[in-house]
Amino acid sequence: MKTARGFFKPLAIGAPAPWRELPARVERMIHFVPPHLEKVRAKVGEIAPTVDVILANLEDAIPADAKGAALAGTIALSREVDFAALGVGLWVRINCLNSPWHLDEVATLVEKAGDRIDVIMVPKVEGPWDIFYIDQLLASLEAKHGVTRPILLHAILETAEGVMNVEQIAGASPRMQGISLGPADLAASRAMKTTRVGGGHPGYRVIEDPHADGSPRVSVQQDLWHYTFAKMVDACAAHGIKPFYGPFGAIDDPVACEQQFRNAFLMGCAGAWSLHPSQIAIAKQVFSPDPTEVAFAKRILEAMPDGSGVAMIDGKMQDDATWKQAKVMVDCARQIAAKDAEYAALYGF
Ligand SMILES: CCC(=O)SCCNC(=O)CCNC(=O)[C@H](O)C(C)(C)COP(=O)(O)OP(=O)(O)OC[C@H]1O[C@@H](n2cnc3c(N)ncnc32)[C@H](O)[C@@H]1OP(=O)(O)O
Ligand SMILES: O=CC(=O)O
Ligand SMILES: [Mg+2]
């Protein structure tokens, strides 16, 4: 265990000092781009102003023989689009740490684009040791290449061992920006008998007892992910980092996608992945608080200016705890409004 002071010391001579607070960024959707496909890459300049984060994906979904092209495409992308000027984050998902690719990827990314990449997403993180390793590697490379702003780390929670260790993963380094649930790999790791990328399953349900008259029994679908999700959200919140829902693979089912994203939003998530352009607007709408809720939250703050005491608004009791909830909602809306003129108007900021 590191000492409190040691936690914030650079891990290499000449490396930038670790972040003490996460930079305040709106990250409602992490839009995945396959960077080896020139046709898709060419459209990123057009898509970027509509998203909060563009992620160049090097891992799963990129064929083994295209890993080099994806890395080269990522570097090209970092030069072709001025993400910082657009207020859009540039993230990269590297290959997992036991793959033959991750070392060259991290070395090349820091050397050629270290001052333009905001976050490296690390897949299949099993425990804090994976974060210690990549933290040290990044510090050494940042020092070597004169990178002045530490690259943040985002872990995907997608193995049973990772779920077991999620609390230590969340607190493993000041570089930790957040964690995403990876339901597809997690399903495989747990030997779940599914063939889906996230979402529910019609077979996972509760059913009421038989009726004496033999009439049909009510049966309701349950959430396969609730336990893992809640565990991840609490680990992230306790460590002051951000939880995210990951991929929703049924591109042809926007209704279920919206529901999955909404559950994540209500549970405390900052955003989710968009795999297809059609999922961008869904994530944007869901992860921007509802203007009616924001208006109600503003009324709570106004009714209790110092955040203490008790008040009644429209028949609902308000006290310090609802004031804090209202503050979360209004702060989130204010942050989004500062970036997004459409929402600034909706929220009246
Ligand atoms: C399972 C766990 C995980 O690891 S999930 C993360 C890994 N998977 C990914 O990153 C997948 C990213 N998405 C994609 O590759 C594509 O969206 C997939 C799912 C293959 C569908 O592509 P496609 O069949 O071309 O869709 P489409 O014909 O409806 O596309 C319409 C136009 O949009 C484009 N498009 C598609 N996806 C993206 C994207 N992610 N970013 C930017 N543009 C995208 C298509 O190229 C197509 O463009 P055009 O109209 O032909 O000019
Ligand atoms: O990488 C994401 C997943 O669901 O697996
Ligand atoms: Mg995965």
Image (spheres, helix red, strand yellow):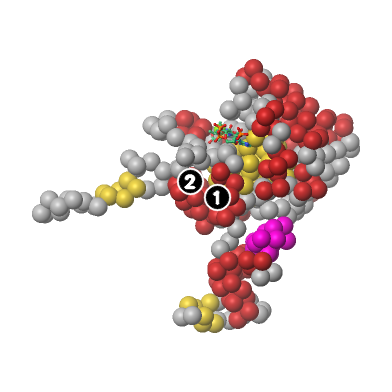
x, y percent for residue 236: 61, 50
x, y percent for residue 24: 73, 55
Ligand 2 shows up in which quadrant of the image? top right
Task: Examine the rendered structure and indicate whether residue 18 appears above or below residue 237.
Answer: above
The quarter in which the N terminus is drawn is top right
Task: Examine the rendered structure and indicate whether residue 331 appears above or below residue 90.
Answer: below
Residue situated in front as seen by the camera: 167 or 125: 125
Q: Which mark is residue 254?
A: 2
Tag 2 near tag 1, CB within 8 Å: yes
Q: Quadrant of residue 133?
A: top right
Is residue 145 shown in magenta?
Answer: no
Give the amino acid type for the residue marked by disc 1 in the picture. Answer: Ile
Residue situated in front as seen by the camera: 348 or 204: 348
Res 144 visible? yes
Residue at the spot 55% in from the left edge and 81% down from the top edge: 310
Which segment is the magenta one? 332-344
Q: Which residue is mark 1?
A: 282
The chief SS type of the magenta part is helix
Query: Which residue lies most toward the top here?
Result: 65
Residue situated in front as seen by the camera: 314 or 349: 349
Label 2 vs 1, first from the N-terminus: 2
Position of 11 with respect to 259 (left or right) is: right
Q: Residues within 10 Å of mark 2 (few under 14, many from 20)?
A: some
Task: Examine the rendered structure and indicate whether residue 151 appears above or below residue 69.
Answer: below
